[in-house]
């Protein structure tokens, strides 16, 4: 699909791509690359760590920095090298890994494609949740090919089930919306959300313990912040219903992994579907790799391959706005960035 670009309204600025080289054709497929090159002069890529940066004279001209995974940390050194930098357009999600206090002090604008990245992440989470509600993970691991008389797995099924969502984040909102197409109950834990907001979204706000104790599936969508690190532990997982499933497509460090492993060992009826773990890739000697009731995927929920063009499109649309002197649609300021995943 061609990217919806408007022609530049003023002379093109210099831009630099700070991308892992292998991402470039996916983020900006050939049709989009031609448009991008029409609008900006490309130097780069800067990255990954250790690769040689563009020539100093080129960096001095840079007004627009297009980044994605692999962008360098924008510390004083990089910022001094790009004195004309006015805007960073980030073709990925979380920005906290590369913005610094010095970055904010310089008044540079920042825009992120986190909202576009939430779509693919939520599709994956929804799929994992629905499969869990049908007890698919259990049947797969037991290699059960004859439909059992279901007295033993009475909670199975999507209709009238209860799903607990942790975090009314970008991803969490998408997942809730997708699940609302089905007739099921949705509980929400999010300390930043009022009962009124929850009502508006069509979910029931509750505390974490109630959410774990009453949900058939719990899906984690909170941001990793100092205050959320290790927020899920044994005391939550222990009270899960028989045959319940815990899905984590957010961040491994939100969960106390040692406590989770202990509960999964003690409760073989539970399933954990983990797209993320504390250390990635999940270490070869991690019990998570051996536990039969753990489904591991390699951090693939977010935009990958063809889906990356969704993020590239956001960057190109933002670039058009910037060149036209319009406000960025997906700008984040320092306060918003601190609350982000
Ligand atoms: N597996 C993957 O490939 C991907 C994973 N992610 C992860 O998914 C998660 C959600 O990402 P986004 O939707 O962009 O997050 P976000 O930046 O939208 O999250 C912020 C929101 O989280 C909620 N929140 C804040 N504190 C909370 C708490 N203590 N408990 C529960 N909720 C709280 C608030 O509603 C806040 O507005 C993050 O952990 C992110 O790193 C995101 C994209 C891809
Ligand atoms: O960008 C992110 O936050 C991811 O987890 C990778 O898609």
Image (cartoon, helix red, strand yellow):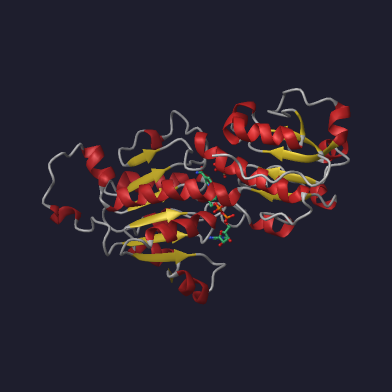
Residue 47 in the figure: left or right of residue 86: left
Kindly identify the residue that appears in the image at 20 percent across and 36 percent down: 143
Q: Can residue 138 be seen at all in this image of the molecule?
A: yes
Residue lying at the far bottom in this picture: please name it. Answer: 196
- Quadrant hosting ligand 2: top right
Kindly identify the residue that appears in the image at 14 percent across and 53 percent down: 150
Q: Is residue 56 above or below residue 333?
A: above
Q: Nearer the viewer, residue 231 or 83?
A: 83
Where does the image place residue 3, in percent across and percent down from the top left?
61, 41
Where does the image place residue 236, in percent across and percent down from the top left?
41, 58
Q: Can residue 23 be seen at all in this image of the molecule?
A: no
Kindly identify the residue that appears in the image at 25 percent across and 51 percent down: 134
Q: Quadrant of residue 165?
A: bottom left
Kindly identify the residue that appears in the image at 80 percent across and 51 percent down: 104
Residue 217 in the figure: left or right of residue 144: right
Where does the image place residue 324, in percent across and percent down from the top left?
77, 51
Where does the image place residue 101, in percent across and percent down from the top left?
79, 50
- How many labels sit on residues? 0
Q: Nearer the viewer, residue 9 or 191?
A: 9
Residue 206 in the figure: left or right of residue 69: left
| Quadrant where the N terminus is found in the figure | top right
């Amino acid at each position: 699909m061609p990217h919806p670009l408007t022609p530049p309204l003023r002379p093109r600025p210099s831009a630099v791509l700070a991308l892992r080289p292998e991402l470039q054709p996916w983020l900006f497929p050939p049709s989009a690359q031609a448009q991008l090159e029409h609008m900006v002069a490309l130097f780069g890529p800067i990255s990954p760590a250790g690769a040689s940066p563009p020539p100093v004279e080129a960096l001095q001209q840079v007004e627009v920095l297009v980044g994605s995974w692999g962008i360098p940390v924008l510390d004083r050194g990089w910022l001094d090298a790009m004195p004309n930098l006015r805007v960073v357009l980030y073709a990925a999600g979380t920005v906290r890994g590369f913005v610094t206090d010095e970055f904010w002090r310089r008044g540079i604008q920042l825009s992120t494609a986190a909202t576009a990245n939430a779509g693919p992440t939520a599709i994956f989470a929804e799929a994992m949740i629905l499969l869990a509600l049908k007890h698919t993970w259990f049947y797969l691991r037991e290699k059960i090919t004859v439909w059992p008389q279901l007295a033993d797995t009475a909670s199975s099924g999507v209709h009238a089930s209860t799903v607990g969502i942790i975090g009314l984040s970008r991803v969490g909102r998408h997942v809730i919306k997708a699940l609302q197409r089905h007739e099921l109950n949705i509980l929400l834990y999010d300390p930043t959300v009022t009962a009124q907001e929850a009502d508006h979204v069509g979910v029931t706000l509750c505390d974490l313990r109630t959410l774990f104790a009453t949900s058939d599936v719990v899906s984690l969508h909170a941001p990793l912040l100092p205050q959320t690190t290790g927020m899920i532990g044994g005391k939550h997982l222990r009270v899960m219903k028989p045959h319940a499933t815990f899905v984590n497509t957010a961040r491994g460090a939100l969960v106390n992994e040692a406590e989770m492993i202990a509960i999964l060992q003690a409760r073989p009826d539970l399933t954990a579907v983990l797209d993320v773990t504390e250390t990635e890739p999940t270490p070869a000697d991690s019990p998570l790799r051996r536990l039969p009731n753990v489904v591991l995927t390699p951090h693939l929920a977010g935009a990958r391959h063809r889906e990356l063009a969704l993020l590239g499109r956001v960057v190109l649309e933002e670039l058009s706005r910037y060149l036209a002197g319009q406000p960025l649609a997906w700008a984040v300021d320092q306060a918003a960035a601190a609350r982000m995943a």
